[in-house]
Image (cartoon, rainbow, N blue to C red):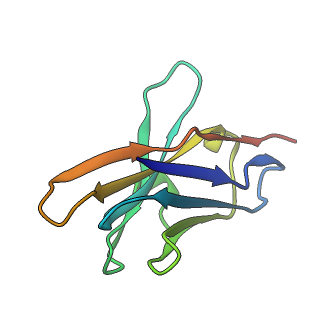
Amino acid sequence: QVQLVESGGGVVQPGGSLGLSCSASGRFFTINTMGWYRQAPGKQRELVATITRGGRTNYEDSVNERFTISRDNAKNMVYLQMSRLKPEDTAVYYCNAEVRLQSWHGLTNYWGQGTQVTVAS
């Protein structure tokens, strides 16, 4: 079993910054791509950013150049540094990881429980 635990959400004023962290724990062989997704009220969950094990990143257009995703493979952690936040960034942010439980297994998707980010003055 794999657990993903996010931390770092909260309330921030427009234009402010906030950092999120996600820690993966449990028994597994390796973690492939990790990422952050978000879901605003009444909307579908959407991709925010992903990062491969080798460090290649991908961002949703609206957060490009404002958000930075990074990871620490040794600690099984992924981070999201958010700057120049806007009210439309308000959402529950979810951590995602593609996990290979054993070397001969395929990839399984795991999700964290989510952390609320609210951007308001």
- Viewer-side residue, 41 vs 102: 102
Q: Is residue 81 visible from the viewing direction of this image?
A: yes
Q: Is residue 66 visible from the viewing direction of this image?
A: no
In the shown orientation, is residue 45 left or right of residue 10? Answer: left
- Image coords of residue 43 (percent x, y): 48, 24
Q: How many marks?
A: 0
Q: Image point 11% across, 62% down: which residue?
A: 104
Q: Image point 42% across, 39% down: which residue?
A: 46
In the shown orientation, is residue 58 left or right of residue 36? Answer: left
Which residue occupies the extreme left position in the image? 104
In the shown orientation, is residue 10 left or right of residue 63? Answer: right
Q: Image point 33% across, 74% down: which residue?
A: 53
- Viewer-side residue, 25 vs 20: 25
Q: Image point 88% across, 42% down: which residue?
A: 121
- Image coords of residue 91 (percent x, y): 62, 36
Q: Quadrant of residue 113?
A: top right
Q: Quadrant of residue 90?
A: top right
- Viewer-side residue, 35 vs 120: 35
